[in-house]
Amino acid sequence: MLATRPPQRQPMQCGEWTLIKILGSGGFGQVSLWKNKQDVKLAVKQCKNQLSRQNERRWRKEVEMMQRLNHPSIVNFVEVPVEIQNAYVDHYVALGMEYCEAGDLRKFLTQPENCCGLPEFQVRNILQDIGSAIEHLHERQLVHRDLKPENIVMKEKEKNVFQFKIIDLGYA
């Protein structure tokens, strides 16, 4: 008897956008990575179908906050292309964000080369970026309330130099 391969799952296509992978999930839903034919990448946070009234309010508030905030150390809001938005027709409004390819701070801290600590310049960089973002939020009477390494992502500015950015304002 010949062994057969399991069928290959076709990537999800929405117009010129392709779903690449799921980046993570949490209490509200999941974040997925999309790429278009021009190699533009977009992180899309989609909300679960059934939310309590309180969580639905939090979700809508997060989307509104992300649209208003503009700071280099807070992940940028990106309008979700209509083709992708239509794919989430059974969900609440999807939240589009810039894709930060270097992952989150937790993964960075747990890499073998970082297990004994980070160089001082790196710690200063993290504190400067995140401190600046927190100050920006506080100036707008916002408190993050869920700041942890998993909610700080990294975007590479140049080789081994990162911009640290806050994500997940769902409890702000």
Image (spheres, rainbow, N blue to C red):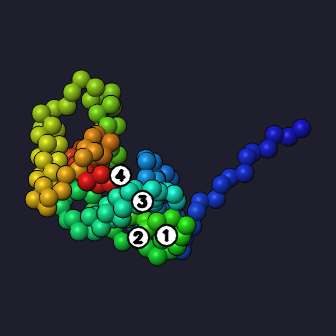
Res. 80 mark: 2
Marks 2/1 in contact by CB < 8 Å: the verdict is yes
Q: Residue furthest right?
A: 1
Q: Is residue 11 above or below residue 85?
A: above
The residue depicted at 33 percent of the width and 27 percent of the height is: 112
Quickly name the residue at label 1: 84
Q: Which is in the foreground here, disc 2 or disc 4?
A: 2
For marks 1 and 3, the one nearer the N-term is 3
Mark 1 secondary-structure assignment = helix
Res. 101 mark: 4
For marks 1 and 4, the one nearer the N-term is 1
Marks 1/3 in contact by CB < 8 Å: the verdict is no
Measured as percent of width and height from the top left, residue 92 is found at 46, 65
State the separation of the CA atoms marked 4 and 3.
33 Å
Quickly name the residue at label 3: 53
Mark 3 secondary-structure assignment = helix
Q: Which is in the foreground here, disc 4 or disc 3?
A: 3
Mark 2 secondary-structure assignment = loop
Q: Amino acid at mark 3?
A: Arg
State the separation of the CA atoms marked 2 and 1.
7 Å
State the separation of the CA atoms marked 2 and 3.
24 Å
For marks 2 and 4, the one nearer the N-term is 2
Q: Residue furthest top?
A: 116
Q: Amino acid at mark 2?
A: Val
The residue depicted at 18 percent of the width and 61 percent of the height is: 71
The residue depicted at 42 percent of the width and 59 percent of the height is: 53
Q: Amino acid at mark 1?
A: Ile
State the separation of the CA atoms marked 2 and 4.
18 Å
Q: Amino acid at mark 4?
A: Glu
| Residue nearest the observer in this picture, 37 or 68 | 68
Q: Which is in the foreground here, disc 1 or disc 4?
A: 1
